[in-house]
Image (spheres, helix red, strand yellow):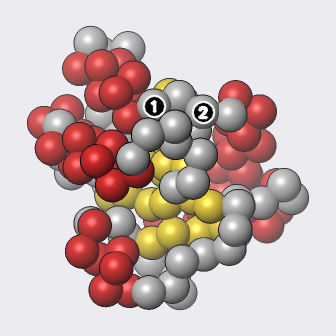
Amino acid sequence: MNDTLTLLLIDEHTGEHSVFSAAAQQAFPRVNCFFAHTCEQAIASVKNKVIPQPDFIFLDWLAWPHQPVADLQQLQGAVEMKGARIFGLTADGPVTERSWRENLGVNRIIEKQSNVNLYAVSIFKVVHDIP
């Protein structure tokens, strides 16, 4: 892992970007946050070097306008995203069925938070594999 973490949030709701960024900056002293509205946009942005290759990808699990599993497979198949760990975000509480997550290649799914302090703790824990 580099000294500076590169996080990519894929979320169609632009308002979520500022809360995520504030939480990530609170959780880590050296972090760069980048944002995309769709998996397709994220892949193109990394491919075209608009966004550097992320260390960690956080994606909104329920807000996608299309099929989340197909979009996730597209993201996982992109050479530009190789090596990035993927975490899901949901407003409905974390999905806990481990076999389901692992079959999709998602490391963990965490609950979105409107409270920056709580969100920072959640982001810190998933990045460092703390249960």
Give percent across and percent down for residue 14: 70, 28
Q: How many labels does the image show?
A: 2
Q: Which residue is drawn at 44% across and 77% down?
A: 129
Does 115 appear above or below 3? Answer: below
- Contact? badges 2 and 1 (CB < 8 Å): yes
Mark 1: which secondary structure? loop
**Real-space Cα distance between discs 2 and 1?**
7 Å
52 with respect to 97 (left or right): left
Question: Against 57, is 107 above or below?
Answer: below
Q: What residue do we see at 70% from left, 68% from top?
A: 92
Q: Position of residue 37 (x, y in %)?
A: 53, 28
Residue 64, how many percent across, how many down?
52, 42
Quadrant containing the N terminus is bottom left
Secondary structure found at label 2: loop
Q: Name the residue under label 2.
A: 12
The picture quadrant where one finds residue 115 is: bottom right
Query: Is 76 placed above or below 131 here?
Result: above
**Residue that appears at 52% across and 37% down:** 65
Q: Is residue 102 visible?
A: yes
Amino acid carrying mark 2 in the image: Glu
Marking on residue 38: 1
Q: Which amino acid is tagged 1?
A: Thr
Circle 2 Cα neighbour tier, 10 Å, few/some/many (<14 / 14–19 / ≥20): some
- Does residue 13 appear left or right of residue 11 in this picture? right
